[in-house]
Amino acid sequence: MSKVINALNCKCPNCKDGKIFSESGNILLLKIPKMNDRCPICDYKFEREVGFFFGAMFVSYALAAAEMMACMVVFWSLIDFSPLRVFLIIVAMAFLLSTLNFKLSRSIWIYLFYKEKV
């Protein structure tokens, strides 16, 4: 369970203290989060090879799809908004959560391929 919490908090999988991202970013200012190349505490290299984070796109897609489906269920089925209103809410949520999805998808991808040294 601690690995899940550390991944959600974007902590280094090696030392569990260092931050994966140096800047959190802001979608309203059109700034994407800035990622550290290495852990500032233990010097663990986050990008294992060139193109390593290509697979994080699929994790980001899954996160966004889950968020959109949850919005659809809540606003269409439970609250009974019109389809156009639900669509606009889903688009707004996808836009506002894009930086969070970017950070979480990369953090989850790093944790998926982290192997502890024995």
Image: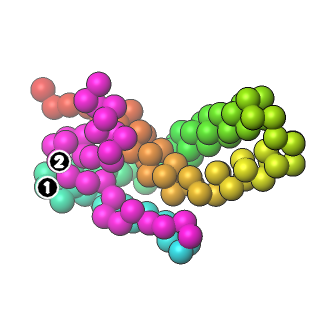
Name the residue rendered at 72%, 47% in the picture: 90
Task: Give the Cα separation between the discs numbered 1 and 2.
Answer: 7 Å
Name the residue rendered at 44%, 66% in the picture: 25
Circle nearer the N terminus (1, 2): 2
Highlighted range, magenta: 1-28
Residue annotated with mark 1: 41
Nearest the viewer among 91 and 47 is: 91
Nearest the viewer among 18 and 53 is: 18
Q: What x and y, as percent, mark residue 77?
A: 77, 29
Nearest the viewer among 6 and 115 is: 6
Number of labels in the image equals: 2
Q: What is the secondary structure assignment of the residue under circle 2?
A: loop
Q: What x and y, as percent, mark residue 44?
A: 21, 50
Image side of residue 57 versus residue 88, left or right: left
Q: Could you tell me if the residues under marks 1 and 2 are in contact, i.e. CB atoms within 8 Å?
A: yes
Name the residue rendered at 13%, 51% in the picture: 42
Image side of residue 29 versus residue 83, left or right: left
- Which of the two marks, 1 or 2, is nearer to us in this view? 2
Q: Can residue 52 be seen in this view?
A: no
